C-alpha cells in the first residue's frame, strides 16, 4: 500500500513530463478543459493560506490538473513544494475558487481537507531517513506518519478536524483499491490508516468498527494489539526524531514477519478491506452530514432569534414613539383627545373644579408624612483599615504590627480603622392613575377625583422630584392632573358617561409622562375600572401591564362592584365603599416607595 506517497522525493521534473507527453505520435498535448495557467492564481492563494496552516513561509504550492507524482497531492521536502491536483475542486472552475478568502474552503471541503493533510506533512514531517536505511522500514515509518501528522496538526488547529475527516475518503480509498502491499501487510496498512486516525481523534470509534472487526479477524487480536501499540507510540514522537520513527517502522516489520507464516490470508482480502473501508467512509459522511444539518438548523434558529429580537426592538421603539406622541397630545391638550391625538371636545368628562375640603387637606398631610417615613433610608457605613492615620487606633492590631516587625517579617497588621458614613438618597415617587369613565363607573368619579388630588398634593410635599398624573379614559383620553412638580390647588371633578375603553393608550401616556418603566423611583400605576372590556381592549391593556410589572412597577386595580373583572397581571383590590379609594391608593403608594431600593 503506497500510503507514504504524500511525502515525495522529486523523481521527475517538469521537463521529463513534457517529453513524456510527446512520446506517442508527436501530436501537441491535449489541452484540459481548464488551462493550467488559470490555476496559477489558485495555487498562489493556496500558498498564502499554507503559511497559517503549516507555520512555514518557505513553501510553494503548485496547482494544476493532474500531478507529477500521480497522487491527489504530495509534499516534496527537498523542493519545499506542495503539489495539488486541481481536479479535486471539481466541478468548480478556477475563477470560482478563492482560497485567500477565509471561509471559501467551505465550498470545497474535500479538496481543502487534502490540502490541510499536506500542510500537516509540511509542518510535522521534518525527519529524514539516513542513507542506507532499509526501504521497507522507511515505508512502514511513512505509513505510521500519516496519522501522526494529522494528530499533531489537531493539537494546534482543532477546528480542522472536519476537513481531515472529509479528506480521509480522498486519501485512503485509492490506496485500498490499488494496493502495493499484499496479504496481512495490506490489512495492517488499512488498520494504520483508519484505526490510527481513530486513535488521534480524526474518526470516531463507532465509525471505524467495521475495519476494526475485519482487521482483528485477519490479523488476530494479538497482532492487532501489537500494531496498535506501535502506532500509538509513533503518535508521541517528536517531529525531528528520525531514530524513533525508524525504530517504530522496524518494530512494525518485525511484528508482521513474525505473524505472517501463521496467519491465513483470505483470497478476496482486497475486496473485504475495500468493503469495510466503504462502510467506515459512509458512516463518516453520514455523521458529517448530520453535524452540518444540526449546525445549519442552529444557525437558522439563531438567525430567526436575531430576526425576532430585531422585530421586538423595532416594535418596542415604535411603541415608545407612539407613547410619546400620545403623552404629548394628552398632557399638552386643554381637553379630551382621540386615540390619534386629534381634539374631541364633545367627549370631555371634566365637569369643573372645586376647592379641596379640610378632610382632603388633612389626608394629604398624613400621606405626605407616611411617604416621607417610607422613603427614609439609614446612612450606610463603610469601614476601612490602614497602617497609618487617620482613623481610630486599635491597640491589638498595633501590638501585632510591632510583633511582626520585631520578628523580621513584613508587617501586615493595619491598626487604624476609619469609618465613612454616607447618606442614602431618598427615592422619589411616581404615581399614575387611570380612571375608567365609561357609564358603569359613575360611582367612582367623586372618590377618585379626591384620591388623585390627595396623592398629587402629598407627593409634591414629600419630594420635589416626585410626580403624579391622572388620566380619565373611555374611548378618548383626558388629562385630569398633568405631570408636574407643583401641587394642584383645586380638585378636578368629572363624570362617567363614555363608552368603549382605551386603557392601552392611557397606560402608554402615563408610562411616558411619569417614566413608570424606569427604575430608581417608587413607581405605582392605579387602574380604577370594572374591566368590562372586549377582547382587543383587554389584550392591549394586559400587554402594557406586563411590560410595567416586568420593569418593577407595581400595578393596582381598584374595583367597586362584585361584577368587576380582573385584569391579568394587576393586584386586584375590591372596594365595597367607593369612599375608601383614597385610603387604598395612599396605602399602595406608601408600599411602592418603601419597596424601592
Image (tube, rainbow, N blue to C red):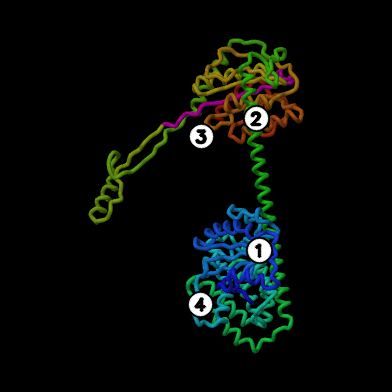
Residue under label 3, please give it: 597
User: Which region shows up in magenta?
Assistant: 423-443
**Is tag 2's residue or tag 3's residue first in the polypeptide sequence?**
2
The residues bearing labels 4 and 2 have C-alpha atoms spaced at a distance of 75 Å
Q: Residue furthest left?
A: 406
Q: Is mark 4 in CB contact (under 8 Å) with mark 3?
A: no
**Is tag 1's residue or tag 2's residue first in the polypeptide sequence?**
1
Q: Residue at x 71, y 70 (%)?
A: 278
**Is tag 4's residue or tag 2's residue first in the polypeptide sequence?**
4
Residue 203 seen: no
Q: Residue furthest front?
A: 26
> What x and y, as percent, mark residue 440?
74, 21
Q: Which is in the foreground here, disc 4 or disc 3?
A: 4
Q: Residue at x 70, y 66 (%)?
A: 283
Q: Residues within 10 Å of mark 2 (few under 14, many from 20)?
A: few
Name the foreground residue: 374 vs 335.
Answer: 335
Q: Does residue 301 appear to the left or right of 43 in the view shown?
A: right
The residues bearing labels 2 and 3 have C-alpha atoms spaced at a distance of 28 Å
The residues bearing labels 1 and 3 have C-alpha atoms spaced at a distance of 73 Å
**Is tag 1's residue or tag 4's residue first in the polypeptide sequence?**
1
**Is tag 4's residue or tag 3's residue first in the polypeptide sequence?**
4
Q: Residues within 10 Å of mark 1 (few under 14, many from 20)?
A: some
Label at residue 65: 1
Q: Is mark 1 in CB contact (under 8 Å) with mark 3?
A: no
Residue under label 4, please give it: 129
Secondary structure of the residue carrying tag 2 is helix
Name the foreground residue: 281 vs 304.
Answer: 281
Residue under label 2, please give it: 319
Amino acid at each position: 500500500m503506497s500510503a507514504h506517497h504524500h511525502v515525495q522525493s522529486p523523481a521527475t521534473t517538469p521537463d521529463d513530463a513534457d517529453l513524456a507527453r510527446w512520446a506517442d505520435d508527436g501530436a501537441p498535448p491535449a489541452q484540459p478543459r481548464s488551462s493550467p495557467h488559470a490555476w496559477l492564481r489558485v495555487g498562489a492563494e493556496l500558498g498564502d493560506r499554507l503559511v497559517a496552516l503549516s507555520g512555514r513561509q518557505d513553501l510553494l504550492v503548485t496547482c494544476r490538473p493532474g500531478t507529477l507524482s500521480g497522487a491527489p497531492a504530495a509534499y516534496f521536502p527537498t523542493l519545499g513544494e506542495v503539489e495539488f491536483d486541481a481536479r479535486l475542486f471539481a466541478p468548480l472552475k478556477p475563477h470560482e475558487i478563492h482560497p485567500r478568502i477565509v471561509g471559501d474552503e467551505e465550498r470545497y471541503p474535500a479538496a481543502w481537507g487534502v490540502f490541510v493533510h499536506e500542510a500537516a506533512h509540511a509542518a510535522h514531517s521534518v525527519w529524514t531517513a539516513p542513507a542506507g536505511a532499509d526501504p521497507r522500514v522507511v515505508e512502514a515509518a511513512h505509513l505510521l506518519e500519516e496519522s501522526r501528522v494529522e494528530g499533531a496538526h489537531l493539537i494546534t488547529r482543532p477546528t480542522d478536524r472536519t476537513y481531515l475527516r472529509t479528506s480521509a475518503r480522498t486519501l485512503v480509498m485509492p490506496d485500498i483499491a490499488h494496493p502495493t502491499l499484499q496479504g496481512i501487510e495490506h490489512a495492517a496498512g488499512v488498520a494504520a490508516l483508519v484505526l490510527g486516525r481513530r486513535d488521534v481523534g480524526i474518526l470516531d470509534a463507532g465509525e471505524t468498527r467495521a475495519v476494526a472487526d475485519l482487521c482483528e479477524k485477519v490479523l488476530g487480536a494479538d497482532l492487532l494489539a501489537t500494531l496498535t501499540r506501535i502506532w500509538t507510540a509513533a503518535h508521541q514522537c517528536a517531529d525531528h526524531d528520525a531514530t524513533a520513527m525508524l525504530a517504530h517502522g522496524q518494530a512494525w516489520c518485525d511484528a508482521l514477519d513474525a505473524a505472517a507464516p501463521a496467519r491465513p490470508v483470505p483470497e478476496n482480502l482486497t475486496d473485504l478491506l475495500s468493503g469495510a473501508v466503504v462502510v467506515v467512509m459512509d458512516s463518516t459522511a453520514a455523521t458529517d452530514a448530520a453535524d452540518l444539518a444540526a449546525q445549519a438548523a442552529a444557525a437558522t434558529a439563531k438567525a430567526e432569534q436575531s430576526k425576532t429580537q430585531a422585530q421586538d426592538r423595532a416594535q418596542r421603539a415604535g411603541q415608545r414613539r407612539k407613547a410619546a406622541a400620545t403623552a404629548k397630545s394628552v398632557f399638552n391638550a386643554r381637553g379630551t383627545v382621540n386615540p390619534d391625538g386629534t381634539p374631541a371636545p364633545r367627549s370631555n368628562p371634566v365637569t369643573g373644579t372645586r376647592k379641596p375640603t379640610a378632610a382632603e387637606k388633612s389626608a394629604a398631610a398624613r400621606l405626605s408624612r407616611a411617604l416621607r417615613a417610607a422613603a427614609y433610608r439609614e446612612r450606610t457605613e463603610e469601614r476601612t483599615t490602614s497602617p497609618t492615620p487617620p482613623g481610630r487606633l486599635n491597640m491589638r492590631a498595633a501590638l501585632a504590627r510591632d510583633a511582626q516587625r520585631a520578628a523580621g517579617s513584613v508587617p501586615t497588621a493595619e491598626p487604624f480603622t476609619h469609618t465613612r458614613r454616607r447618606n442614602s438618597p431618598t427615592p422619589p415617587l411616581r404615581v399614575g392613575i387611570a380612571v375608567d369613565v365609561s357609564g358603569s363607573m359613575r360611582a367612582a368619579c367623586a372618590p377618585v377625583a379626591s384620591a388623585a388630588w390627595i396623592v398629587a398634593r402629598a407627593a409634591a410635599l414629600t419630594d420635589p422630584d416626585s410626580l403624579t398624573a391622572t388620566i380619565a379614559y373611555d374611548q378618548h383620553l383626558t388629562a385630569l392632573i398633568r405631570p408636574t412638580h407643583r401641587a394642584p390647588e383645586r380638585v378636578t371633578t368629572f363624570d362617567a358617561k363614555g363608552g368603549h375603553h382605551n386603557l392601552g393608550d392611557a397606560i402608554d401616556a402615563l408610562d411616558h409622562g411619569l417614566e413608570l418603566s424606569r427604575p430608581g423611583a417608587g413607581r405605582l400605576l392605579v387602574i380604577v375600572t370594572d374591566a368590562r372590556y372586549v377582547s382587543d381592549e383587554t389584550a392591549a391593556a394586559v400587554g402594557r401591564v406586563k411590560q410595567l410589572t416586568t420593569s418593577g412597577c407595581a400595578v393596582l386595580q381598584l374595583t367597586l362592584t362584585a361584577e368587576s373583572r380582573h385584569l391579568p397581571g394587576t393586584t386586584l383590590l375590591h372596594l365595597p365603599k367607593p369612599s375608601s379609594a383614597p385610603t387604598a391608593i395612599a396605602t399602595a403608594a406608601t408600599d411602592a416607595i418603601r419597596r424601592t431600593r
